[in-house]
């Protein structure tokens, strides 16, 4: 039986949504990428596939926010 890949859906948007929620409660400097990943229900390594840095994630959240 072949192992199937994990499919989250729109992971990038889920991470941005998680970051927006964290920014609302903790402020833009009050969370880590690991916490954003946890809020999206994925591993911290998943964040690195979509955002080169924490500032890039915050910038995208601000752009959408």
Image (spheres, rainbow, N blue to C red):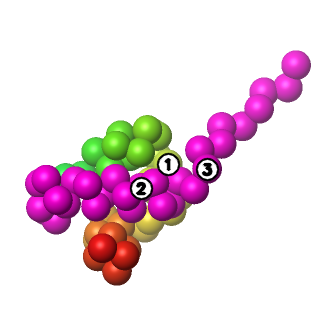
- As helix, strand or loop, the secondary structure at mark 3 comes to loop
30 lies above or below 2: below
27 lies above or below 25: below
Q: Check the image and name the residue furthest to the bottom.
A: 63
Residue behind mark 1: 46
- As helix, strand or loop, the secondary structure at mark 2 comes to helix
Q: Which mark is residue 25?
A: none
In three-dimensional space, the C-alpha distance between marks 2 and 1, rounded to whole angstroms, equals 9 Å
- The residue positioned 49% from the left and 48% from the top of the image is 46
x then y, percent, for residue 61: 33, 70
- The residue positioned 22% from the left and 53% from the top of the image is 22
Q: Which residues are magenta?
A: 1-29
- As helix, strand or loop, the secondary structure at mark 1 comes to helix
29 lies above or below 9: below
Q: Is residue 26 highlighted in magenta?
A: yes
User: In terms of depth relative to the viewer, which is nearer, 10 or 45?
Assistant: 10
- The residue positioned 43% from the left and 67% from the top of the image is 52
19 lies above or below 63: above
Residue behind mark 3: 9
Q: Is residue 5 left or right of residue 54?
A: right
Whether residues under marks 2 and 1 lie with C-beta atoms below 8 angstroms apart, the answer is yes
The quadrant where residue 29 appears: bottom left
Image quadrant occupied by the N terminus: top right
Q: Is residue 16 highlighted in magenta?
A: yes
Q: Is residue 10 visible?
A: yes
The quadrant where residue 21 appears: bottom left
Q: Which mark is residue 15?
A: 2
Local crowd at mark 2 within 10 Å, few (<14), some, or many (≥20)?
Answer: many
């Amino acid at each position: 039986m072949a192992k199937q890949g994990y499919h989250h859906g729109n992971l990038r948007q889920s991470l941005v949504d998680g970051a927006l929620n964290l920014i609302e409660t903790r402020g833009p400097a009050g969370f880590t990428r690991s916490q954003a990943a946890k809020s999206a229900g994925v591993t911290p390594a998943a964040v690195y596939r979509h955002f080169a840095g924490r500032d890039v994630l915050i910038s995208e959240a601000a752009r959408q926010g």
